[in-house]
Image: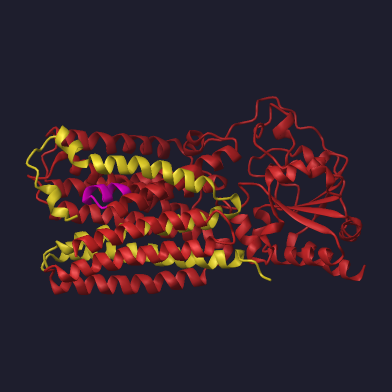
Amino acid sequence: MDASTFYKSTTTSLSMDFINQHIQEIYFVIFCVFIGIEVIANVPAILHTPLMSGANAISGVILVGAIIVMLRVPADDYLNLTLGGIAVFLGTLNISGGFFVTGRMLKMFSPKK
Amino acid sequence: MHAIIEIGYLIATLSFLGGLKFMSSPKNAKTGNLIAATGMVLAVVLTFIAAVTATVPYTNLVIMLLAIAVGTVIGKRLSDKVEMTGMPQLVSLFNATGGGCAMLLGLVEANQMDVSTTVLGNKILLIAGLITGAVALTGSIIAERKLAGKVKDRRSKAVIFTARILLVLMVLLPVLYFLGFIPISFTVFMYVLATVAMVYGVLFVLPIGGADMPVVISLLNSITGIATAFAGFVYGNKVMIAGGIFVGAAGILLTLLMCKAMNRSLLKVLAGTFKKSKNGTVEEEQEIKDISISETAMSLSFAQKVAIIPGYGLAVAQAQHVCGQLQQLLEKRNTQVDYIIHPVAGRMPGHMNVLLAEANVEYSHLKEMDEGNENMAQYDTVLVIGANDVVNPAAENNPDSPVYGMPIIRAHESKQVIVMKRSMGKGYAGVQNDLFGLDNCSILFGDAKVSLQEIVNQLKLI
């Protein structure tokens, strides 16, 4: 969905419009909470560290947001280009480091024989 | 193009879910990680392609490509270099980067958007994402510094008091701003909030004790996830919402699990307090039997079933590899060896399992606390290495003890317990350990690594 469509509303107060516009997302969040808890509760204690670092890597999906915001920064707005660039860098670091290190840990858990 | 991207995001969301699902068995976990990583790459590449096809300035694209390339390389480097004992620090560090990304995104977005036409709901979401991101950023950095032993606990009243004021400010300032009491532009206001939240992150983690780090790390992890979800909500981007919420759920779940394993409420952990023992608790004189290395080797050689209870002291002494050797040696003599692992052993949830897996211990030997406790009476010899509070029977039978109520590994129910200790120092809780005075318990003094090596050498001769 294009981000700019979200800013077209002319109401400036927290109105029912906002809820109406976002009702899909609200449902989505609620389902995600329950599905997430169900799936994660099944992970055994032995794998909690890889789970955490893997989950940490998944939270790096914030990078998608960083890219979206970078699209709209004017090419001569150096302050925001710098901040956005750092954001993209940090997001990538989170993803790359997170998945690589989780992979390294899980390799040690595979059966050796 | 639009539809392709939406489908790509859907696949990515499913891959996160599938990846986490595969984590439920050690055999498939590696595949799970690969699936989630593939989904992530798909989501990022699709977003980037969308960027290239839109009319985006060349400069922006170059900056992004550079940032992605450098980030990937550094991430790979860091993850290749890290020692398994340093895993909690690295996870904290990566968590800080996620938080930092969320915070910067909030700042840049505040600059880009048309303030007059943006609905209040989106502004609030943006603020929420900014604050949670900033707290996760500085909080994780302090947690990392503390785990590395570079920053000490500061439990002064001033720190706790200031932290509470900042917490109130983070809620109050946006309310005042939207009511029109703060006459500054939205952009400047976001910078102010980011600063307040970053300072709060520091003060929030400073008073929390080193042993409570498993709780803090998982909590901060969850906060980053929530920050991601807030940002996803602003953009109506479902893959960001789903990813963020899954991480948030994982973090909260592990946080509560850790709190339960330490018998402490989350609030108490966050306040940095530890239950003090009641006044007048007389520390009874304990009669302690010590045992020599050759006696230990001897009783291990006669045992049919041996259990090893490792604590973080094992990792501090870098003794996990020698420990693995001892296990292999005993198994060659047809002795069954199990590891019984307390949920809070180590510096983050499940840390001890990773350390042992690195020392080539098969996961079928790693028993969880409940399973170990059920079969405790069958063990001929139990070796406690670098653990203290988690085997203290006072947690079950002395209501006056500060550790009372904490679930423990009932080592005292086995036939013989040998505790390897550097000195008679107390555990983190600062409590006398009733186990040491029991008849079936003896203590082997000395550095765990040196002692284990000696035991291995002597066992080879027997």
Give the position of the N terminus of chain B as an image quadrant.
bottom left
* In the foreground, A78 or A63: A63
Is B27 on the left-hand or right-hand side of B161? Answer: right
Give me the chain that's red: B
Is B312 on the left-hand or right-hand side of B171? Answer: right
Residue B421 location in percent, x, y? 76, 52
Image: B236 above or below B85: above
* In the foreground, B100 or B234: B234
Figure quadrant of residue A30: top left
Q: Please state the extent of the stretch shown in magenta in the rendering.
A: B229-237
Image: A56 above or below B276: below
Tint of chain A: yellow
* Residue at 30% from the left image edge and 62% from the top image edge: B8
* Residue at 14% from the left image edge and 46% from the top image edge: B186
Magenta residue check for B231? yes
- Disc tally is 0
Query: Is residue B357 visible to us here?
Result: yes
Query: Is residue B198 visible to us here?
Result: no
